[in-house]
Image (cartoon, helix red, strand yellow):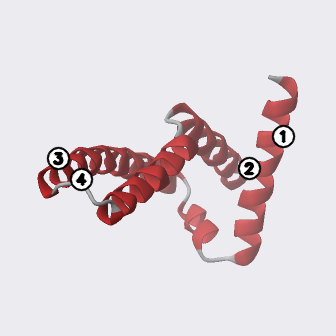
Amino acid sequence: MIYHILLILCVILSYEIITAFHFKADLKRILIIYKKIFLNFKRDKSDSFKEKIILLLSKHLFFKSLKILIIILLICLLFYIFYFFERGLIKVFYDYTEILKFITIFLLYYYFKKKFF
């Protein structure tokens, strides 16, 4: 019973971390930055201009990537903390039925929150 409660808490907290830090928007922004970097190589501008633009875009890309890494580490830390309460929680990562439970809880929470909040 405690396993399922912790699994639900992990799902809810993971979802809230993802939404609070705008994970999806950051992923889209990274793809846009990549496109800009590659388009900048194709342009016939001066090398010094390209160098400045690429440096600026690389800084943005680095900080967005760092933010995504921090979000992923927070979610891993969350699972690690809950792992100390219930050792069986590690099954979520390697058992298909547990992955399906995780996804089902995630989708239920997503639709519940979307509909009622």
Helix, strand or loop under label 3: helix
Q: Residues within 10 Å of mark 2 (few under 14, many from 20)?
A: some
Label drawn at residue 52 = 3
Foreground tag (4 vs 1)? 4
Q: Residues within 10 Å of mark 3 (few under 14, many from 20)?
A: few
Q: Residues within 10 Å of mark 4 (few under 14, many from 20)?
A: some
Which residue bears the numbered disc 4?
54
State whether residue 80 appears in this view: no
Residue at image location 36% in from the left, 45% down from the top? 64
Which residue bears the numbered disc 2?
106
Who comes first in sequence, dot 2 or dot 3?
3
- Residue 100: give x, y in percent of width and height: 77, 66
Q: Is residue 106 left or right of residue 77?
A: right
Hey, what amino acid is under mark 4? Ile
Vertical relation: 111 (above or below) 32: above
Marks 4 and 3 close (CB-CB < 8 Å): yes
Q: Decide which of 25, 72 is in the foreground and name it.
A: 25
Label drawn at residue 111 = 1
Hey, what amino acid is under mark 2? Phe
